[in-house]
Amino acid sequence: MKKIKLLLGILALAFISSCSSDNAEIDTEYPVVDISGSNAFPIQCSTIERGKTFTFKASFNDNVALGSYSLDIHHNFDHHTHSTEVESCEMEAVKKPVKPMLFINNYTIPDGVKNYEATAQISIPADVDPGDYHFMIRLTDKEGWQTLKGLSIKIL
Amino acid sequence: MKNAQFLFWKSCFLLISLLLSAEAISQNQPSEKKPEIKELKEVLVNGNAVEKRKKEESLNVETVNSSFIQRNLGGSLMQSLQKLPGVKTISIGSGGSKPLIRGLSFNQVIVVENGLKHEGQQWGADHGLEIDQYAVNRVEIIKGPSSFIYGSDAVGGAVNIKPLPLPFKNTFGGSVDLTGKSNNAQFGSSLNLFGRNENWFFDTRVTAMDYGDYRVPTDKVQVYSYEVPLYKNHLRNTAGRELDFHLSTGYSGENLKSVFYFSNVYAKSGFFANAHGLEPRNVDTELHDKSSRDILMPYQQVNHLKVSNTTSFNWKNHAFETQLGFQKNFRREWSHYVNHGYMPPIYPEDMYAPQDLERQYDKNVWSFSAKDEFAINRHQITVGTNVVSQENAINGWSFLIPAFNQINAGLFVYDKIELNEKWFLHGAVRYDYGKIKMQSYYDWFQSPVSENNQTQLEYLQRSQDLTKTFDSFTWSAGINYNPGKLSLKANLGSSFRMPIAKELASNGVNYHYFRFEKGNPNLDAERSYQLDLGMEWNQQNWSFQLTPFVNYFPNFIYLNPTSAHDIYYGAGNQVFEYEQSEVFRYGAELQTRYYFIKSLSAEIAAEYLYSEQKSGSKKGYTLPFSPPPSVLLGLNYEPQIDFLKDTYFSVDYRFTAAQNNIVPPEKKTAESHVFNVALGTKVKTGKEDISINIQIQNLFNTRYLNHTSFYRLIELPEAGRNIIVSMKIPFSFSR
């Protein structure tokens, strides 16, 4: 009987001691991509012209610290993608890509920043296929939480 | 808030276990345990054999037989075993799952079938275990480190599917299993034939299954931030089919037994169509929703072939056993070509792989093992060795892991000492050696690389020629004390796991979760130390079992989500990189059953697990796929009815607590309340009894998420109400 009590004692200790080892709050919040601002660009259904450079603008927020972000423009000629936005845009007919625009880049955000106004210059070559494209914003925070924003845009 | 909830759970669990154990100890009146005779297929096995095994094994072992599987039949073997506390699954759709033992899975849990370690693509959460659950007669689940028996990988536990019992002498018979499920409109059938004269026998089985898309109690789901409408509650393209063959044949004599096993398990199943590729996708709903039974892209095909021979013979007081085995796991993932990174928009015509072949893994495994069991005085000693060699080839237009060759060898000694009827001591040591040789791989397309302001097009190298060797010494020590109705056990052991090719050298996109996964060639072999305790009380109307454990990993291998993105192959997706961190885990399972009267009993099964990373970039976080605490309450009524046998009615209620202890990219999962009912009986017809089992899973069609489901990350709910009817019709021919 003593042995059993001892065993239970050890068990109880193990549970209690582990309770106290619980450390401070960990970050479980996702970063936020905010494109509701008046100067945010592109937004859902925006149009961009070939042979010109446009400026990407969005504001990013996180409760602890932002990580980095990536931007990606790829064609949606096959209508494969749908966006994260409620509003839907008018689409051209399905077509085959010849020389679709492809843009992938990643950007750093200064360390320890909670709010960040992101801007990036992106130039669209004059010889790419016009049509429906998809603009992806992927934002992480320092802990590795990620938020996606997928926008439908048109290259004219 | 989170901590408060945890504390609450912990103290609840602690309190309940203490109260119940105190109760168990206070009830000390003697009573007779009736030896229960269980019918295991054609062979009668004394129920006490399982009891005895439990009492003489210092690790925590649960054994279930085919009638348990039949009563709790799920879509796949592990889903049928989920009722056991501490055993969960990582499920993919309705027809596949991987074992999750106390929160560990993939390469940390091994599956052994007929003595042969099952070698598939264990690391992938996107396909199930290639095991035919109709062919399973008896499964032993070891909840704890069993590296000393099985070598690398058995860190979290083992699922040991025992060989089929041999048919009785001079018999010829078989059985037909029929199964129907309402939720995914599944039809399944399995035909078994066996026979034996004096010494020669055979046992064959064919299993076929066909199921449609499974249904969930919702008409739209959120894949990350994307809303996906569902047609008639069907999870688009999750249909599947399976076709399996088995044959075991051989000779069984007084001192020699030699058995050949052959099996081929084939499965084809679809992936949820809106969530595969580089981002959540729009699909041709007209095409997809035309039929709920067709399997369109993306889908996978897996074929697992096993051939082995086990020969055992006795010589003096030695029992020798050798085993030779070959396995071939061939897995293909089909999906429309989606160019990403700098892949050309149109698939080149002269490519080495078909256009829709996204990935292909071809694994060949040869294994040999030998062991000798003998007794010296009170020592029962087992000495054994095994060598496994594997070749892994890859194909398809996408890259995730390189091709590799691997060899593992081990040597162990295990001593079980029976001090007297009540006391057993165990000690084991094992040495392992492993070598993995990975091959280099270059992209088949060029990507622009900027260097010194100059941009050049290059074929990027995704993996390098790399050879790594590992060796390890593991040990285990245990004790059993069985004073009458009470049995106590304790085991302290170490175990290890060699890093796999995925962890060392992956460098590509995981198309299910839209992430870029990167290996780490500097990983060490993972080590684990675990203390297991077990307490069991058994008397005629009341049984109780508590199995706590404490576990420490100095260097757990973990896929860490970083804040970076990959701009080449990853097309801007988030980078996940393998790292090692210290991990501390503990938990317990509790099971108790009380008989109010002979025919009415109540059951409680509960489990609790806590994991925390103690170092590294996710310090303070838990581990992925951590099952939340859960309690299963069951009522079971087994009336005696003339001309029927083993009739039962049961109601289960499973309460699963919320899982708020998460790690990126997981999401918090709310609590759930799910009810199941089951009934069944055996109809006496001549010599054989036809058994019928009916289950209604998720009785109230509750919408809930399972934290450990493969589809949890993309927020797909679990299956809605599912009525399962199964029937087993045995037959025999007189000779």
Image (cartoon, grey):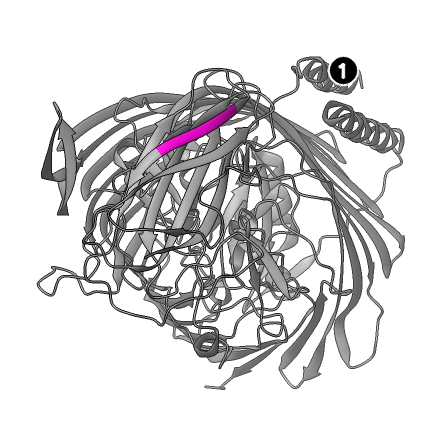
Residue occupied by mark 1: A9
B366, above or below B266, in the image: above
Q: In this view, does B288 lie to the left or right of B702?
A: left
> What subunit carries mark 1?
A
Q: Position of residue A25 (x, y in %)?
A: 66, 19
Tag 1, which secondary structure? Answer: helix
- Image quarter for residue B108? top left
Q: Position of residue A87 (x, y in %)?
A: 56, 58
Q: Quadrant of the C terminus of chain B?
A: bottom left
Q: Position of residue B363 (x, y in %)?
A: 24, 52
Q: Which amino acid does label 1 sit on?
A: Gly
Tell me if residue B480 is in the magenta stretch: no
B688, above or below B659, in the image: below
Q: In this view, does B385 lie to the left or right of B8?
A: left
Q: Is residue B199 left or right of residue B704?
A: left
Is B341 in front, or is B503? Answer: B341
Helix, strand or loop for the magenta stretch, by majority: strand
Are there few (<14), some (14-19), or many (20+) residues within 10 Å of tag 1? few
* Residue at image point 78% right, 57% down: B652
Q: Is there any visible trace of residue B331 in the rendered image? A: yes
* Residue at image point 77% right, 24% down: B7
- Image quarter for residue B409? top left
B509, above or below B677, in the image: above
Looking at the rendering, the stretch of residues picked out in magenta corresponds to A116-120
B466, above or below B267, in the image: above
Q: Is there any visible trace of residue B400 in the rendered image? A: no
Q: Position of residue B584 (x, y in %)?
A: 55, 20
Tell me if residue A117 is in the magenta stretch: yes
Is B432 in front, or is B538? Answer: B432
Q: In which quarter of the image is the N terminus of chain B?
A: top right
Q: In this view, does B660 lie to the left or right of B453?
A: right
